[in-house]
Amino acid sequence: MDLFAGLKCKHIARKLSPTLPPASTSRTPSIPDRAMWKKSNGFMARLRQPFSSTESDVSFQQPSAIDVRRKCQHFRILVIGRTNAGKTTLLKKVCMSVEDPEIFGPDGQKIDSNVVEGSTDRGLHNIENQLIFKSNPEFIFHDSRGFESGSSEETNKVKDFIARRAAASTLEDQLHAIWYCLPTGDTTRPLLKADEDFFDTDIRGKVPVIAIFTKFDGLATRAFQELRDNGYSRSDSQQGKEQRAEQLLTTDFIEPLSSRKVPPSDYLRLADMHKDTTNCNELMEKTAKALTDDNLRLLFVSVQQNNINLCIQYAVGR
């Protein structure tokens, strides 16, 4: 399927520093890395310069990344999804961390993780709390839980949060993107009433929503068993499970979401997130593409650390 053509992006392990160090501190890399280093170093130098304006608009210059970062030092993402949707694993992969995030209240005060874990077990998770990973502190995540309960109160909390963030006067306090995680392993409940309600309500404004189909490997396992139950050999079932899983993903998830009044900005699937070789390059690429504000896109590209090709792509595009 064309939708998933980018799933096998080459993983770039080398980090891109979000702090934009001066050129004088750059270290010449070893020979194998030199070509990539030249590209990334050129990109970083370009970020320090303001974009050139056209002759017809000489009074206006788009700001450089460093100008944007002065106004807004963090990229804020709301992560929506059911319990066990793989959200924590996803965020750890995005921030290249093996540790859990630190948790801060709306006032910026750090919260004891033991207190949060206790409240989470009782279903009292606070969407206002800010999750920050030490490995990539420029990302601020908000986690919404409890959609599977079917509670309109929980859904209204999410809507209210999005509305208040949209009305914030500063870029720093606004919500910049939404990652909506939908586990595909449990196809007995592909979409909940709360999911349908969210994508039928125009509350997000210009904030892009990326639908992330997690645990696709679980859907492939279900497809394998379905083929076996229909009389296919083990070998044929193994060979055909990916194609059948893609069909199930389309009919049970993508088509129903696409038919809602306000469908997602884009879609992607994730599998084998527990493996070290798995990356989130496609998620980074689709999030950047979905951002319609050039300043926000520049901020996002400069903040994310795990896809240097994305940095080069948007530097060249300019």
Image: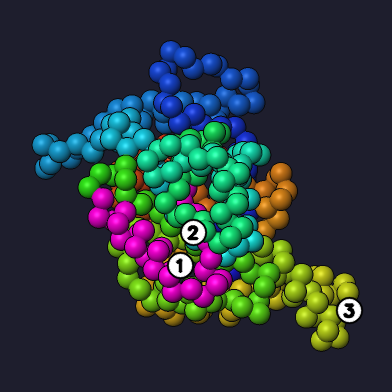
Q: Inspect the image, locate mark 3, and give the three-letter code of the amino acid beneath it.
A: Ser
Where residue 110 sits: x, y (%)? 48, 37
Asked if the residues shown at circle 3 and circle 1 are in contact, with their CB atoms under 8 angstroms apart, the answer is no
Snapshot quadrant of residue 54: top left
Q: Any mark on residue 144, and which?
A: 2
Left or right, 46 with respect to 184, comes to left
Where residue 150 sits: x, y (%)? 51, 75
- Sequence order check: which comes first, mark 3 or mark 2? 2
Q: Any mark on residue 233, and which?
A: 3
Comparing 43 with 188, the one in front is: 188
Query: What element does badge 2 sit on?
Result: strand
The verdict on residue 17 being magenta is no
Q: Inspect the image, locate mark 2, and give the three-letter code of the amino acid beneath it.
A: Ser
Residue range (magenta): 140-168
Asked if the residues shown at circle 2 and circle 1 are in contact, with their CB atoms under 8 angstroms apart, the answer is yes
Residue under the point 52% across and 58% down:
124
Where residue 183 sits: x, y (%)? 62, 66
Q: Inspect the image, locate mark 1, and give the three-letter code of the amino acid beneath it.
A: Glu
Residue under the point 63% across and 53% down:
8
